[in-house]
Image (cartoon, rainbow, N blue to C red):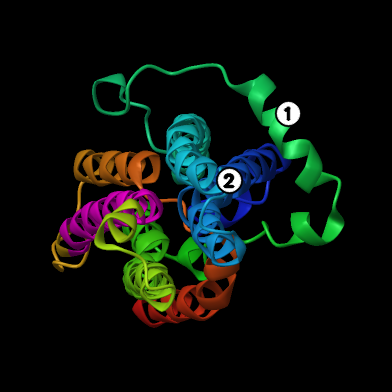
Amino acid sequence: MSNGIAVRQNEEKAIAMLAAQRQLYNDAKKLGTISIVLSVWLPFAMALILLFLPEESICKNVSYILAIVSMLFSFVVDKHINDKKKLAAFIQQKFDVYVYNMPWDERIFGKQKNVNQDIVNYSKQIIENSDKKERLYNWYTPTVDNRDLLTSILLCQRENLSWDVGLRKRYRLSSIIMIVFLCSLVIVMGLWKNESIAMLLWRFAFITPMLEWLFDTVKTLNKDMGRLKELDEIINNDVSKTMDELQDIQKMIFEHRKECYAIPNIIYKIFKDNDEDAARRVVSIDN
């Protein structure tokens, strides 16, 4: 007997919610790319430009200042990223609660908000693109429809998260390698120009924004993976769950979505399909 998940997840209002949250996350990731440019690539470019400037050029001092100013601008961008993620997470929470036929407990999830206008505004771009819209259908593996509702909710929650840890581990490692490499190049440039100790120290104006970005990124990713590990232990402990317990899990998923690092789409697309496909196969086996 059908539990209704397969039908509800493909209704037009559910697809509109998915389209809106996806567009919001895409917007957050684009802003994240701007933040990376301001914190990493612009300071590195400034360091590179110094190779071609004469020693007495006033532009050298300007380049040091620009590197620091770019880091300050990145803080403003980060504020907008967080706003986008919070709205996207709320809309996705509404989608999940509707599809799961789960009561919205304000004590657990917070107060309900009317975000219909936001859904209409942010879903438009994807809804009007037939290919992008098509990818939103069957968000959860349709076979979960054949199990009892509580078991199916748990399987969907597991499907949501099982591929996410590996993606974040890869991004953390690649970020560390990239920043260590770029910072090393900045120092090597100064050594190649036979700069004095004082001038080499000035190069930390370029390195500081990069390291600040790396520390914040790694810190956020570590928190993400900590939450995901805790969720994994709860979801995969082979103990039957009540609706109240599933609501507690859903709250943790909601919090993770609001706080998690928005991995750039170029990295996301490389690994997501393979990881998510593996997650779907696991759910199919569970069924």
In three-dimensional space, the C-alpha distance between marks 1 and 2, rounded to whole angstroms, equals: 48 Å
Which of the pair 98/201 is nearer the observer?
Answer: 201
Pointer 1 residue: 120
Q: Main secondary structure of the magenta part?
A: helix
Q: Residue at x 47, y 43 (%)?
A: 96
Q: Which residue is mark 2?
A: 59
Q: Nearer the viewer, residue 103 or 279?
A: 279
Is residue 140 shown above or below 126? Answer: below
Q: Can residue 244 be seen in this snapshot?
A: yes
Say which label, 1 or 2, has the lower sequence index. 2
Q: Is-magenta flag for residue 184? A: no
Which is more toward the observer, 145 or 56?
Answer: 56
Between marks 1 and 2 in the image, the one whose residue lies nearer the viewer: 2
Assign a secondary structure to mark 1.
helix
Q: Tell me which amino acid carries mark 2.
A: Cys
Tell me which residue sits at (54%, 65%) in the image: 48
Disc 2, SS: helix
Relative image position of residue 210 (x, y in whole percent): 38, 55
User: In the rendered view, does 89 fall on the left or right side of 170?
Assistant: right
